[in-house]
């Protein structure tokens, strides 16, 4: 049996229907990482063979003012999950982030799994701690770092994903000033879900990077979304210094996905993925 925590999020909603066999979508009502006692209660009543953790505290800026909230979920909750999986003999698949990098401000080449992490935010530090407790406490683990997720199931709810937000604001006729000096590779959740299924089927373990291929900036993603949709937008590129936020973002967090590619798991280029997302968005509007 495969359990998926965070099943109602962007990635979880794409992942659950792609997984084979007996798949159990979990919500916070079933298992809440903010309350570690719920982890033990769940495992007392259920014995999954594999648990995929798509859940996280991802309020990046709020985590600067309240790092404890981020660590409760992303580190200590994940530690409880890792311990429980180990005791049950279950494999833990844990989704992490490119925000575990950023300290190397001079970096200009894609980061591999062997590169030393260096977070520049409380959120990034909490996610790195989550990686470490997973790898420390659960012998059978797969940790997957990804970046800037967007998907059809993120088109509604709490403001939507980045692409959705850009299209909405442009549609309102408002000017957009978007950072053009943060280099990364935002990733389509449908593509990531397909890749996760392949890694799980290959019984991959350890640490892997998975993003769409190539490198870009948030400004370029917005510009490409406007081009593909024929949206007229007043879009201006700006440096990060002109868009201050409570939490620092990595200036360069492009991930090298060669390790996964060696197993035959490779995601398409980010422009193709963005076009596919926009097609899905047009043809199957999200409601959740």
Image: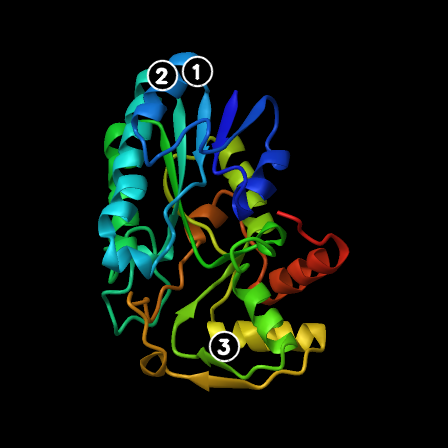
Q: Which residue is mark 3?
A: 219
- Closer-to-camera residue (100/123): 123
Query: Percent position (x, y) of residue 133?
Result: 25, 36
Sooner in the amino-acid sequence: mark 2 or mark 3 = 2
Residue 259 spot, x, y in % from top left: 42, 48
- In the drawing, does residue 14 fall left or right of residue 206? right
Label 1 belongs to which residue? 47
- Please tell me which residue is depicted at 58% across the width and 78% down the height of the picture: 223
Q: Identify which residue is drawn at 32% across, 67% down.
A: 250
For marks 1 and 2 on the same chain, the one whose residue lies earlier in the sequence: 1
- Secondary structure of the residue carrying tag 2 is helix
Give neighbour class at mark 3: few <14, some 14-19, many 20+ (Cα, 10 Å). Answer: many
Relative to 48, residue 94 above or below: below
Q: Is residue 167 above or below residue 124?
A: below
Which residue bears the numbered disc 2?
88
Residue 281, image x, y percentages: 69, 58
> Residues at badges 1 and 2 in contact (C-beta under 8 Å)?
yes
In the picture provided, is 218 more to the left or to the right than 231? left
Cα separation, mark 2 vs mark 3, equals 45 Å
């Amino acid at each position: 049996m495969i359990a998926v925590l965070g099943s109602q999020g962007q990635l979880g909603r794409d992942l659950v229907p792609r997984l084979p066999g007996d798949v159990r979508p979990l919500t916070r009502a079933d298992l809440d990482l903010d309350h570690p006692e719920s982890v033990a209660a769940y495992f007392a009543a259920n014995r999954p063979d594999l648990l995929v953790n798509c859940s996280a505290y991802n309020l990046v800026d709020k985590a600067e003012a309240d790092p404890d909230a981020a660590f409760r979920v992303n580190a200590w909750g994940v530690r409880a999950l890792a311990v429980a999986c180990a005791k049950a003999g279950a494999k833990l698949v844990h989704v992490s982030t490119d925000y575990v990098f950023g300290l190397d401000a001079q970096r200009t080449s894609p980061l591999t799994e062997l590169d030393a992490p260096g977070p520049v935010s409380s959120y990034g530090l909490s996610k790195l701690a989550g990686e470490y407790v997973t790898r420390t406490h659960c012998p059978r683990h797969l940790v997957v770092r990804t970046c800037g997720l967007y998907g059809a199931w993120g088109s509604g709810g709490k403001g939507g994903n980045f692409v959705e937000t850009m299209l909405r604001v442009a549609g309102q006729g408002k000017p957009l000033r978007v950072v053009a000096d943060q280099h990364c590779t935002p990733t389509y959740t449908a593509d990531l879900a397909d890749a996760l299924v392949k890694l799980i089927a290959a019984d991959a373990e350890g640490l892997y990077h998975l993003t769409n291929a190539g490198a870009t900036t948030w400004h370029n993603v917005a510009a490409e979304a406007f081009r593909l949709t024929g949206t007229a937008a007043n879009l201006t590129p700006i440096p990060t210094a002109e868009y201050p936020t409570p939490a620092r973002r990595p200036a360069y967090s492009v991930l090298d996905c060669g390790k996964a590619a060696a197993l035959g798991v490779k995601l398409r280029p980010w422009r193709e993925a963005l076009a596919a997302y926009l097609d899905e968005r047009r043809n199957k509007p999200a409601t959740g």
